Image (cartoon, rainbow, N blue to C red):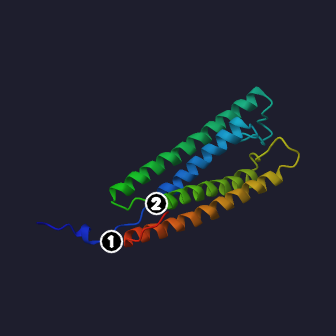
């Protein structure tokens, strides 16, 4: 009877990569689908004077930029799927719901903060609401929402870590 050396080591905690990457990608999809397509508050370059959304040429450029944005979001989701499969193949523990969903929310918040700072403030490509006279309040609200997602998601994730540690120790929890 052979004993595998891996059998004696403690189980590895789940990877954080897949949850964070899912959050980045799904956060991008939510932004693009809800703000760009459904509400039509802005497009990727709708605040750039050369590409006004009230002309066909400007709308074509904005739609193309939105398409590249959605492609990037899709690539984050693919990367998340690859990270999840790698985690399974590495025999890591399955994440608890709170561990994983907390990371997804934190990843969404990271997306909002980075996209908000870079696109809204540094590059000035668009604002959350390009159709209002003073879009700064909407941009700040977007950043605050992102910060709340990061904070709430991380707190939920930490709760998931505790639940998994209790699970491994044989302590039942309702999480």
Residue in the picture at 79% in, 28% down: 55
Q: Secondary structure at mark 2?
A: loop
Distance from Cα at disc 1 to Cα at disc 2 = 17 Å
Indicate whether 25 appears above or below 6: above
* Residue 155 at x, y percent in the picture: 59, 66
122 sits left or right of 174 in the view: right
Q: Are marks 1 and 2 in contact (CB under 8 Å)?
A: no
Res 149 → quadrant: bottom right
122 sits left or right of 25 in the view: right
N-term mark: 1 or 2: 1
* Residue 97 at x, y percent in the picture: 49, 57
Residue in the picture at 37% in, 71% down: 170
Residue in the picture at 85% in, 44% down: 132
Give the labeled residue for mark 1. Answer: 10
- What residue occupies the far right of the structure in this picture? 133
Q: In this view of the protein, which residue sits in the foreground, 109 or 61?
A: 109
Q: From the image, which quarter does the N terminus lie in?
A: bottom left
Q: In this view of the protein, which residue sits in the foreground, 128 or 153?
A: 153
* Residue 118 at x, y percent in the picture: 70, 54
Q: Secondary structure at mark 1?
A: loop
Give the labeled residue for mark 2. Answer: 96
Disc 1: CA contacts within 10 A as few (<14), some (14-19) or many (>=20): few
Q: How many marks?
A: 2
59 sits left or right of 91 in the view: right
Q: In this rendering, which labeled residue sits more in front, label 1 or label 2?
A: 2
């Amino acid at each position: 009877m052979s004993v595998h050396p891996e059998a004696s080591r403690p189980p590895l905690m789940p990877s954080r990569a897949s949850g964070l990457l899912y959050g980045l990608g799904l956060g991008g999809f939510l932004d693009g689908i809800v703000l760009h397509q459904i509400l039509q508050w802005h497009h990727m370059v709708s605040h750039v004077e050369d590409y006004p959304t009230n002309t066909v040429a400007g709308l074509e450029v904005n739609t193309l930029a939105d398409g590249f944005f959605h492609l990037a979001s899709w690539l984050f989701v693919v990367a998340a799927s690859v990270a999840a499969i790698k985690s399974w193949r590495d025999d890591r523990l399955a994440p608890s719901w709170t561990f994983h969903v907390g990371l997804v929310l934190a990843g969404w918040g990271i997306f909002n903060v980075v996209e908000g700072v870079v696109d809204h403030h540094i590059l000035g490509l668009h604002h959350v609401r390009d159709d209002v006279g003073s879009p700064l309040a909407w941009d700040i609200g977007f950043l605050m929402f992102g910060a709340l997602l990061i904070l709430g998601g991380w707190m939920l994730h930490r709760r998931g870590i505790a639940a998994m540690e209790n699970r491994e120790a044989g302590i039942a929890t309702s999480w």
